[in-house]
Image: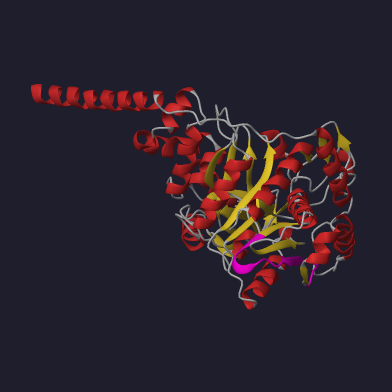
Amino acid sequence: MDYVLYALLGFLGIIILLLLIAFIKTIFMKKPVVKKEIEIDYKDALAYANKFKEMIRVKTISYNEETENGLPFQVLKNKMKELFPLVFNTMEIKEFKGESLILRWKGKSKEKPIILMSHIDVVPAVDSQWDYDPFGGEIVGDEIFGRGTLDTKSTVFAFYQACEELIQAGYVPEHDIYLASSTDEETSGFGASLTVDWLKENGVKAFLVVDEGGTVLSNALPSMTQPMAVVGILEKGYVDIKLTARSHGGHSSTPPKNTPIARLSKMICEIENHFPLKTKMIKEVETLFTNASYGMKGVFKYLFGNLWLFKGLLSKVLPKINPFGRALLSTTIAFTMMKGSDAENVIPAEAWVIANLRTHPIQGVDDSFKVIEKIAKKYDIKAEIISRRETSNIVDIKNPGYKYLETIINRVFPDAIVSPYVMLGGTDCRFYSEVSDAALRFSPVRMDNDELKKMHGNNESIKINALVEAKVFYQELIKNNV
């Protein structure tokens, strides 16, 4: 009996010692030195905003191959030729079906080219739900409002403006610079794919590709006192699973047990209440949390700054208390569409729901589907994949392209903590992994969580100061690639 007591006391002593070591380590975690930010003159920022609003005023809803709605994009390109005449007079221009576009600024060397990219299409906006005209580009105080101000005409404006000013100053880049913009990113179209095919045909192997995705975000994680500049190094995959339940139908006045809708409901409840997929904190997410901990306070700093001790605990707890935590550590499941009977008093002979999964590197499309299919069979439900896309290639953070991007971010946004992260949505960047080992997702735009929520939402806007910083970022990225 004494041996058991001694063992318990020894175990308790080890736990206390580990917790004490973690506490001491936390105390000595130094907060990063915050250097001086770029000084921005309001008049300069306002001048950029007045120029940028001309792009916002062109209503470029995503290109549709069936309707061939390319005219707005032609209008926008003509407007951009007016706004950035030196760019269009200096660079080689290649246009693609659907009005996607790439420009080449010939450098002194073809080695180590950089591709700056983003899309010029936007999602629709309902005028009545906005406080300002969603395609008016109205400047109110220190913000400019309009669809595309964040997603993502602002970055297109910034890298075109950066090049325009450099050309005006007589600058010639050391290496080729490409400016790419698609017109159907929001609908997962073919513009980026056509562009990448052209790059491959011309033997372009990029040192670095920079697309939308990450950003410079304030209050990125709980208790953070510094902004985080997050760089997307991979995108989660995507799969839509149709789950269909069938029966003989019938009149609602004499309902049998286990109708199609009832069976679907039971299946959904099981999946919602007993999450069936794998959960794991991969090293890229661990790096994100570790980097973030240097800007955290209190218990959050203690937990995330000591993942060597608390990684297992956080891996279990985070997915249960936070949707973002679930998304970072697992494939996610969302039931998004459903269909049953067309009449109120008819039991459907067939009912279905769509499960949208964003697949994680630890559990891809096929493995995730097998798990869902197994559960569906318990309720006599048929499962079938109707669309799919695997996770993108993971960029190694030791890659020279990533290291270079990190250096430039630190230079332009010295107050921010730079970190890799997992992109939860999809971008055109996934196509560019075919022409670069450093296809990265980072928009050099400051925003907070409230602004982030405006993407695809109402009253989308950007701080006019952010336009200046983004322009400076792209200029530094171009000039220091030697």
Residue 204: percent from the left, percent from the top? 61, 71
Up/down of 419 relative to 244, above or below: above
Main secondary structure found in the magenta portion: strand
Q: Which segment is the magenta one?
A: 97-115
- Which residue corresponds to the image point at 22% horizontal and 23% vertical from the top-left? 13
Q: Nearer the viewer, residue 389 or 435?
A: 435
Front in this rendered view, residue 107 or 249 = 107
On screen, residue 47 above or below 259? above
x, y (%) of residue 364? 49, 59
Q: Is residue 71 left or right of residue 399?
A: right
- Where 413 sits versus 125, above or below? above
Report if residue 210 lies within the magenta region: no
Quarter of the image holding residue 77? bottom right
**Quadrant occupied by the C terminus:** bottom right
Residue 243 seen in render: no
Residue 113 is a magenta residue: yes
Question: In screen coordinates, is 19 left or right of 325?
Answer: left
358 or 80, which lies in front? 80
User: What count of labels does the image hold?
Assistant: 0
Identity of the residue furthest to the front in this view: 170
Farthest residue to the bottom: give it.
201
Q: Position of residue 419 (x, y in %)?
A: 52, 43
Q: Is residue 84 visible?
A: yes
Residue 432: x percent and y percent? 61, 64
**Rendering quarter of residue 92:** bottom right
Colour treatment of the image: secondary structure
Instruction: Name the quarter where the N terminus is drawn.
Output: top left
Give the residue at x 47% y 28%: 300
Q: Report the side of 77 relative to 308 (left or right).
A: right
Residue depicted at 73% across the width and 57% down the height: 171
